[in-house]
Amino acid sequence: MSVRYISTRGQVEPITFSQAVMMGLATDGGLLLPQTIPQVTADRLRFWATLPFAELAVEVVRLFADEEDLPTDTLRLLCQRSFACFAHPEVTPVVTIGGRRILELFHGPTLAFKDVALQFLGNLFEYILSRDGGRLNILGATSGDTGSAAIHGVRGRSGIHIFILHPYQRVSPIQERQMTSVLDDNVHNIAIRGSFDDGQRIVKDLFNDLPFRQQYQLGAINSINWARILAQAAYYFFAWGKVAAGNPEYRVTFAVPTGNFGDIFAGYLAYRMGLPIERLILATNRNDILTRFFQTGCYGTGDVWPTVSPSMDIQRASNFERYLYYLLDEDPLQVQEAMRSLELTGRLEVSANKQQQAAQLFRAVAVSEEETLAQIRSFFQESHYLLDPHTAVGVRAAAHDPEAICLATAHPAKFGEAVGQAIGHEPPLPPALQGMLERPSRCAILEAETAQVKQHIITTLPAL
Ligand SMILES: *Cc1c(COP(=O)(O)O)cnc(C)c1O
């Protein structure tokens, strides 16, 4: 077996798993994918259903990497280390609340599902760098969630520094402290006097500064890294194993609160590998570009509306191109054409035939702010269980699918204000967040200017 990765746009010579992890975004502007998708037999599914989460993750990932590239024994250590820090012994448990199945993905250090993938990615980066030599300086802008999960994924790891920009005094106090109270030497928080968009612009400027980018080995954190998709695919198999009771024909539906299409693409991957998935319910908030695509075949960008589920307030879903590649018969020329149209006109369209094909597996539902808050309220009244606003979007979208497994992507206390709006009082802080606001913190405060941030990075890093 020899696993190689190619780009959705067809301009990257096949590369190994490690190379794909370090490349992140394909050099031709596309996204990386394995040349073929491995198939899982019914017998193997039954076996996987007996495994603890970390062991199941090993089984999934090893199908996507050559043994010489990532030895299974090493992979096992990386997975054990990645998931040992979760507060629940099952890592990603399935609970049944008032008849509704919920896959809790928020038991990691920052209480959001992104921990599952970013803990793994941090360990993987460290391993590949120690083996191949080299360093990595991660640079990113955050509006809250991704930044803290990334910081917790790489804190204390050798060969890696991380710089995260957040808008000064414009993230919630808890979110701010989740990032700035990490005092490891390799973690560098920067609050910029400006907006999230300013932060994104600065990061983009610095990535476009090619000499700087190369000299300082800048790398990105975002949901396009293939290793993140794999770690997330593992919990679809895990959840299925918990409800299928050893029956390999048992079909399940998942409801997935969706922003950048990363999490739900992992579900699609599991489906393509042979997991018996009936449907994937794609739940969006008012920012419904994906819902419109699956309903009409037209993907057109518009304005971003702020909502109570801010981690899904996106205009363009960074992982969507991966799905498009499969929908367009794995033809990089068609993908190139579609992406060019999106670039030039702000929209792309697929044929009615393709739209119908997509709608057979994906049922897309947009959920309003009122519906989201009403869902939190009614669920709490009926079963005393609090949904975070993102999870509530998914539960609401699955209203007609009582059997669906709903992905719970964040702990409700992370979005206490929205939960408070729904039920009249804010949820109590879980142990992981108690005392958070009193913890010592470290953060540089800079003007929203690219040159200042660049200078700060240069003076902060140990001499080259
Ligand atoms: C990032 C995030 C999402 C959206 O996930 P995607 O992979 O971007 O679709 C949903 N809920 C929460 C809490 C998140 O942090």
Image (tube, rainbow, N blue to C red):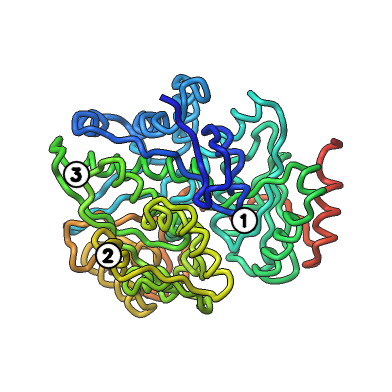
Mark nearest the camera among 2 and 1 is 2
Where residue 20 sits, quadrant-wise, is top right
Task: Say which of 176 and 206 sits in front.
Answer: 206
Quarter in which the N terminus is drawn: top left
Relative vertical location of residue 430 with respect to residue 341 in this rendering, above or below? above
**What amino acid does circle 1 point to?**
Arg
Give the mark, 2 or 1, whose residue is nearer the N terminus. 1
Give the mark, 3 or 1, whose residue is nearer the N terminus. 1
Per the image, the residue denoted by label 2 is 359
Q: Residue at x 47, y 75 (%)?
A: 300
Ligand number 1: quarter of image:
bottom left
The yes-or-no answer for disc 2 within 8 Å of ligand 1 is no
Where residue 406 sits, quadrant-wise, is bottom left
Per the image, the residue denoted by label 1 is 177
Q: Which mark is residue 243?
A: 3
Alpha-carbon neighbours of circle 2 within 10 Å: few (<14), some, or many (≥20)?
some
Q: Residue at x 66, y 25 (%)?
A: 132
The answer to whether any part of residue 435 appears in the image is no
Mark nearest the camera among 2 and 3 is 2
Q: Mark 1 falls on what kind of element? A: helix
